[in-house]
């Protein structure tokens, strides 16, 4: 969808990009200033530790204490070329040929592909309409086998915006311990959360994580640094050593300049992050208000992330799939969406609210027109 949007915009077409995964805020100037300084540092021009710059890894340790109240060891940290590489390496280190990984749906598509690349099988546990933790655990019970090695989810969830509570995370952790499987919690949207407490319970806070936890994070979303490609994994030390061995053969170190800038982001506090979150909350509320005027569209208000995951009723009267519906909306109405099939949930569209307010107004108007005519 992103390539189609770029192509159409290059032809001068007006496209509202509800498909976007880019944060709305600009990169803070102190981060770009740090990158400029790093460019003039001789040691930044050389190979460095494949696990990450020691200074950045220390800042990640400090960040975990500041944001989650959890003390971790620097030996648990591996810095990667974005969270996507961190996920892939963690899957490679835990899932082998013939193994299975349970992936909670809706899911980010890369989870499925990472398991396939490792030679494993992704077993999808559908929880898009499952709201109580007892039922989530039942779904896990239905999906587990003697070949299960890993359970994967994002928190907050991309695309639905669901946020697991501390009690819910603890239940998942206990379940994983009973079955002897790893838990991969992708927390890249950590600071894009709108829960009343204002804070996210990381899986690092759960006692079981010391033995079975894989926590993924990065600077892409919270600091608008999607193109800088800095993510990380936090795992038990033995698994971290295995991931480091993989890293040394896959890519070696992450770009030092990006790492230096990421360290400045983490060490600067959360003022800019909080401002960006508050602005996103306003955009979320605006989109939800506007969508409420469209018949046949329903959703659960997202507690995190940048998206409304909207269920489209009766689309089957005119389209074979929400993929076809999304193509129609782009072709005929100039609004780009991501169909639910990409996330394991046919019948849904993911709509980003990380856009200027005028684009949200215009995009929802085009969406309404398309759905009414369709």
Image (cartoon, rainbow, N blue to C red):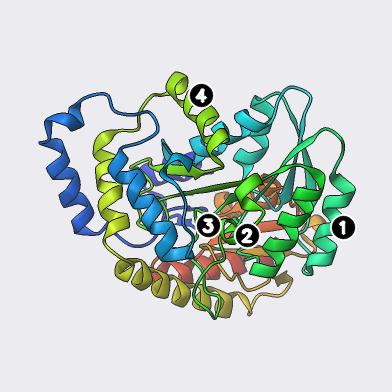
- Residue found at x 38% / y 47%: 226
Q: Give me the disc on residue 206.
A: 2
Between disc 3 and disc 1, whose residue precedes? Answer: 1
Name the front one of labels 1 and 2. 2
Circle 4 SS class? helix
Relative horizontal placement of residue 77, taking residue 224 as reference (left or right): right
Spatial separation of the CA atoms under disc 3 and disc 1: 38 Å
User: Which residue is farthest top?
Assistant: 249
Indicate which disc, 2 or 3, sits on the residue closer to the N terminus.
2
- Location of the N terminus by quadrant is top right
Q: Which residue is mark 3?
A: 335
Badge 2: how crowded within 10 Å, few (<14), some, or many (20+)?
Answer: some
Question: How dense is the environment of label 4, judged by Cα within 10 Å: few (below 14), some, or many (20 and up)?
Answer: some
- Where disc 1 sits, the SS reads helix
Residue indicated by mark 4? 246
- The residue positioned 60% from the left and 39% from the top of the image is 110
Q: Which residue is mark 1?
A: 138
Compare marks 1 and 2 and give the one earlier in the sequence. Answer: 1
Q: Nearer the viewer, residue 129 or 9?
A: 129
Choose between 103 and 207: the one closer to the eye: 207
Disc 4 vs disc 3: which is toward the camera? 4
Closer to the N terminus: mark 4 or mark 3? 4
Residue 356 is situated, as x and y percent measured from the top left of the image, at: 38, 67
Front: mark 2 or 3: 2
Regarding residue 165, the answer to whether it shows in the image is no
Where is residue 88? Give x, y as percent: 56, 33
What kind of element bears circle 3? strand
Q: Residues within 10 Å of mark 3 (few under 14, many from 20)?
A: many
Give the distance between the C-alpha atoms of the residues marked 4 and 3, in whole angstroms. 41 Å
């Amino acid at each position: 969808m992103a390539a189609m949007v770029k192509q159409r915009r290059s032809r001068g077409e007006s496209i509202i990009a509800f498909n976007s995964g880019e944060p709305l805020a600009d990169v803070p100037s102190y981060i770009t200033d740090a990158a400029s300084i790093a460019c003039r540092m001789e040691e930044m021009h050389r190979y460095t530790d494949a696990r990450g710059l020691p200074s950045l890894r220390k800042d990640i340790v400090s960040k975990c204490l500041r944001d989650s109240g959890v003390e971790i060891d620097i030996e648990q940290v591996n810095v990667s070329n974005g969270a996507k590489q961190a996920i892939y390496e963690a899957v490679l280190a835990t899932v082998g040929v013939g193994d299975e990984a349970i992936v909670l749906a809706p899911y980010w598509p890369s989870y499925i592909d990472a398991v396939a690349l490792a030679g494993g099988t992704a077993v999808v546990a559908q929880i898009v309409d499952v709201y109580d933790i007892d039922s989530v655990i039942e779904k896990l019970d239905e999906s587990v086998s003697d070949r299960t090695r890993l359970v994967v989810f994002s928190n907050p969830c991309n695309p639905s915006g669901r946020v697991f509570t501390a009690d819910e995370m603890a239940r998942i952790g206990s379940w994983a311990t009973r079955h002897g499987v790893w838990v991969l919690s992708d927390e890249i949207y950590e600071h894009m959360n709108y829960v009343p407490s204002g804070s996210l319970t990381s899986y690092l806070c759960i006692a079981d994580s010391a033995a079975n936890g894989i926590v993924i994070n990065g600077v892409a979303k919270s600091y608008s640094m999607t193109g800088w490609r800095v993510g990380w994994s936090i795992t038990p030390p033995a698994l971290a050593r295995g991931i480091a061995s993989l890293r040394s053969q896959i890519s070696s170190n992450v770009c030092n300049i990006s790492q230096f800038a990421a360290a400045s982001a983490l060490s600067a506090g959360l003022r800019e992050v909080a401002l960006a979150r508050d602005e996103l909350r306003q955009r979320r509320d605006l989109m939800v208000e506007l969508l409420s005027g469209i018949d046949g569209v329903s959703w659960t208000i997202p507690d995190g992330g940048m998206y409304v995951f909207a269920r489209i009723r009766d689309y089957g009267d005119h389209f074979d799939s929400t993929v076809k519906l999304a193509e129609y909306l782009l072709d005929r109405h100039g609004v780009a969406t991501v169909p639910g099939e990409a996330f394991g949930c046919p019948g849904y569209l993911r709509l980003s609210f990380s856009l200027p307010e005028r684009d949200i107004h215009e995009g929802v108007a085009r969406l309404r027109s398309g759905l009414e005519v369709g």
